[in-house]
Image: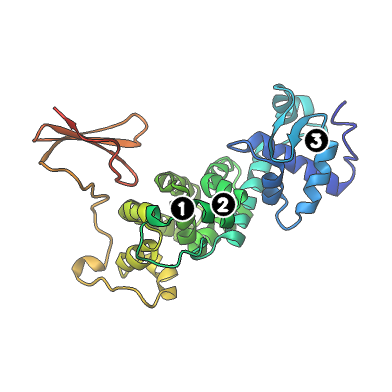
Amino acid sequence: MALEHAGDWTNATFSFSALSLVACVILSREPLTAETMTSIICYGQEELGMPVLEFLGSVLHWGPGVPLSTLHASFSDYITDPNRSGTKPWFIDINLHSQFLATRCFQVLAHKLRFNICNIETSHVLNSDVPDLAERVGTHIPESLKYVSQYWAHHLHATATSPAPIVLDGLKTFASQHFLYWLEVLSLLGHVSGAHEEVEIAQTYAQGKDQALEALLHECIKFIAGFAPAISQSIPHLYISALAMVPHKSVIRQHYGKNWHYRMQFEGASAENWSNLLKLFPGQRGIVTSVAFSHDSARVICGSDDCTLHMVDSQTGAVVGVPFQG
């Protein structure tokens, strides 16, 4: 009854906005404020989202700067159950709305990512040495971009059972035009360690759908594996070092190298193709005699012949904690 009286469900504009907002509340990976949510799902038409929320006050809890949530725990189960609400205009088809949310994520990435997004003036400092980095991030990276940068792959994964051409097109554009700018944002947010998993999800999604895209994503994974430590510590070296050291025959170089004319050149036999070496973890003082992974594969513990144990982040290679002396 609350939904029936929330608004005119025969009005296409109201119905679309209301369903999109409610679906985003249910499917989002973390609570979002009304402002952030409307800037994602109503991108370019944010003015359509806020008025609709006024009509949904009987089923959604929200306020300025307050994350949206459902008022009743059973609400999500009801509105996504085809046996209970499938014939109603407010039924949420999870697959369909996951496609919509994944598409919106790619649109936000395409429109808001850019080179040197925080306007860092020099390439000679580490992220940690930029004194006002937190303020720059707050000024130049909106909450909507922070969210989609971290969770686009999770929404993409939710569409795997019902792939759509528009989602695949969004992924193509992202991989071929915005991949490096996305890594830049992850570096600023301190989330480079999650990049590998996200691109692996994307590669799995692309399998059997687009061979060229699958090959590009495969190289994106190699790029992250090889250069994550440098990227996580210094944004400029994403471009002046990592991109310069990409093999000459790399698909990544074909897509991104043409835009960078003032970088160092990497020569030699190993400069032509990717090495079979996946990752190098520095910092071991002795010969490594044993290796173990954490249950979630996020950490690697290395035992050396000098009776020390080192723990490192499996994606970035950063040392975690201090070595343990046996």
Q: What's the residue type where badge 3 is placed?
A: Trp
Residue of label 3: 90
The residue wearing badge 1 is 188
Left or right: 237 in relation to 323: right
| Residue 266 visible in image | yes
Earlier along the polypeptide chain: callout 1 or callout 2?
Answer: 2
Relative placement, left or right, of 174 versus 127 is right
Spatial separation of the CA atoms under disc 1 and disc 3: 39 Å
Mark 2 or 3, which is nearer the eye? 2
> What amino acid is labelled 1 in the image?
Leu
Alpha-carbon neighbours of circle 1 within 10 Å: few (<14), some, or many (≥20)?
Answer: many
Q: What element carries label 2?
A: helix
Q: Residues within 10 Å of mark 3 (few under 14, many from 20)?
A: some
The residue where tag 2 is placed is 138
In the current view of this chain or complex, which residue is farthest to the bottom? 261
Q: Is residue 15 left or right of residue 286?
A: right
Is the residue 87 above or below the residue 269 in the image?
A: above
Q: In what quadrant of the picture does the N terminus appear?
A: top right
**Residue under the point 25% across and 70% down:** 266
CA gap, disc 2 and disc 3: 36 Å
For the rendered model, the colour scheme is rainbow
**Looking at the image, which residue is at 24% across and 54% down?**
276
Which mark's residue is nearer the viewer, 1 or 3?
1
| Mark 2 surroundings: few (<14), some (14-19) or many (≥20) residues within 10 A | few
Going 44% across and 47% down the picture, which residue do you hit?
A: 190
